[in-house]
Image: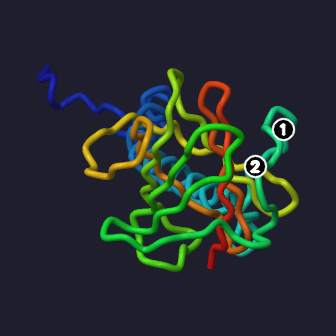
Amino acid sequence: MNRRSVDRPTRGSPGAHPRRNHVDMMRRGLPRARHVAVWLAACSTLLTACASSPPPSTQDPLQGATSRSTLPPNVGPADCQPPSPQSRIDLGIETQAASDGGEIWALFDTEPPLRSGTDLTVWWRMAGRQALELVLVGAGDREVPVADPQPDPSLGWSRPGDQWKSTISFPQPGCWRISATRDSEHGDIWVQVG
């Protein structure tokens, strides 16, 4: 008897092996299930990303600002009454801080007026041995830390003290106090920001 001539049940016929039928169905459905799983994962990721960020108009520009009691008291006139005097020089806007000791100078690398929402390079001249610490103080005495200023003698600006470079960004328009501290020296600059 020829083996080929023996009748065997074919897939899907009543005499077919039930386990083989189940395996064949799984093989045919697996690519479809993978596509559905990938599609569901993509939709879930999109919905999570869209739902996690609030609309820009509801964000507080002073978000992350704090109030701390360790900031030295203000030196000189307060609340921009009047703002610290500014002079326009070739390198930018120069201003001298009201200080409780030595001279403190700031040089804003920009044209007047100062604007909120942009990164401003500010050069500082101040004597001392420790690192320069800067804090912006805005409305309601809310403080915005300034990233660590770095010593940088590359600018040809002659004022007393060591030269430092910082980047400042005023979160919103208004009157701002810039508190500068190094060792026991402290001074304040008051600026009106548009």
Q: Residue 140, percent across and down?
A: 87, 60
Front residue of 145/76: it is 76
Front residue of 34/106: it is 106
Q: CA distance from mark 1 to mark 2?
A: 8 Å
Category of crowding for the residue at label 2, using alpha-carbon neighbours closer than 10 angstroms: few (below 14), some (14–19), many (at least 20): many
What amino acid type should be assigned to the residue bearing mark 1? Answer: Arg
Q: How is the image coloured?
A: rainbow
User: Which is more N-terminal, label 2 or label 1?
Assistant: 1
Residue at 83%, 43% in the rendered image:
73
Residue at 65%, 33% in the rendered image:
185
Q: Residue 9, percent across and down?
A: 36, 34
- Locate the N terminus by quadrant: top left
Q: Which residue is mark 2?
A: 143
Category of crowding for the residue at label 1, using alpha-carbon neighbours closer than 10 angstroms: few (below 14), some (14–19), many (at least 20): few
**Secondary structure under badge 2?**
strand
Give the answer, above or below, for where 156 lies relative to 77: above
What amino acid type should be assigned to the residue bearing mark 2? Answer: Glu
**Secondary structure under badge 1?**
loop
Snapshot quadrant of residue 53 = bottom right
Q: Is residue 171 left or right of residue 4?
A: right
Q: Are marks 1 and 2 in contact (CB under 8 Å)?
A: yes
Q: Residue 127, percent across and down?
A: 50, 32
Residue at 15%, 29% in the rendered image:
4
Give the answer, above or below, for where 118 lies relative to 127: below
- Locate the C terminus by quadrant: bottom right
Residue 68: assigned label: 1
The answer to whether one can see residue 142 in this image is yes
Snapshot quadrant of residue 180 = top right
Front residue of 166/14: it is 166
